[in-house]
Image (cartoon, rainbow, N blue to C red):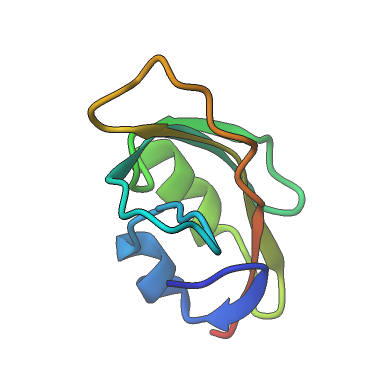
Amino acid sequence: GETGSTKMPRRNLEIATIGALLEDFDFDLNLAIGGFKFKVPGQPTVSVNGNKLDSRAKSALKRARRGDAVQVFDIQAYITNNKSYKLKKVSPVIIEITN
């Protein structure tokens, strides 16, 4: 439920589900996430399939220090009943680690 920039404990990010929403849209669409990129400062970018951090992303997250800003970007969203429809780019989310 977070957008833009936020702060959260490392554990919350480990179990978080990445999602997308269309603001100011008149219809309820079921959106799903096919994958995203995850970046921890000082670590290589990890490409993740699905909507949750995988073991490689969690391993990179463990190396993050308090106050580091990790990024979830290049989020690949699609409409569940129409995968061929191209949605506009999903905005990245910057998360400051609080512990």
Considering only vertical position in the picture, is 19 above or below 33?
below
Q: How far across and how far down the image is residue 12, in percent?
A: 37, 74
On the rendered structure, is 74 left or right of 77? right
Q: What residue occupies the far top of the structure in this picture?
A: 84
Q: What residue occupies the far front of the structure in this picture?
A: 26
Residue in view at x 47 percent, y 44 percent:
57
Q: How far across and how far down the image is residue 53, in percent?
A: 38, 47
Q: Quadrant of the N terminus?
A: bottom left
Foreground residue, 88 or 5? 88
Q: Quadrant of the C terminus?
A: bottom right
Foreground residue, 7 or 4? 4
Residue in view at x 32 percent, y 47 percent:
29
On the rendered structure, is 32 left or right of 4? left
State which quadrant residue 88 falls in.
top right
Residue in view at x 34 percent, y 20 percent:
83
Q: How far across and how far down the image is residue 46, in percent?
A: 56, 34
Q: How far across and how far down the image is residue 35, in percent?
A: 44, 32
Foreground residue, 31 or 98? 31
Considering only vertical position in the picture, is 83 above or below 46?
above
On the rendered structure, is 11 left or right of 66? left
Foreground residue, 31 or 52? 31
Q: What residue occupies the far right of the structure in this picture?
A: 42
Count of marks, rendered view: 0
Considering only vertical position in the picture, is 41 above or below 35?
below
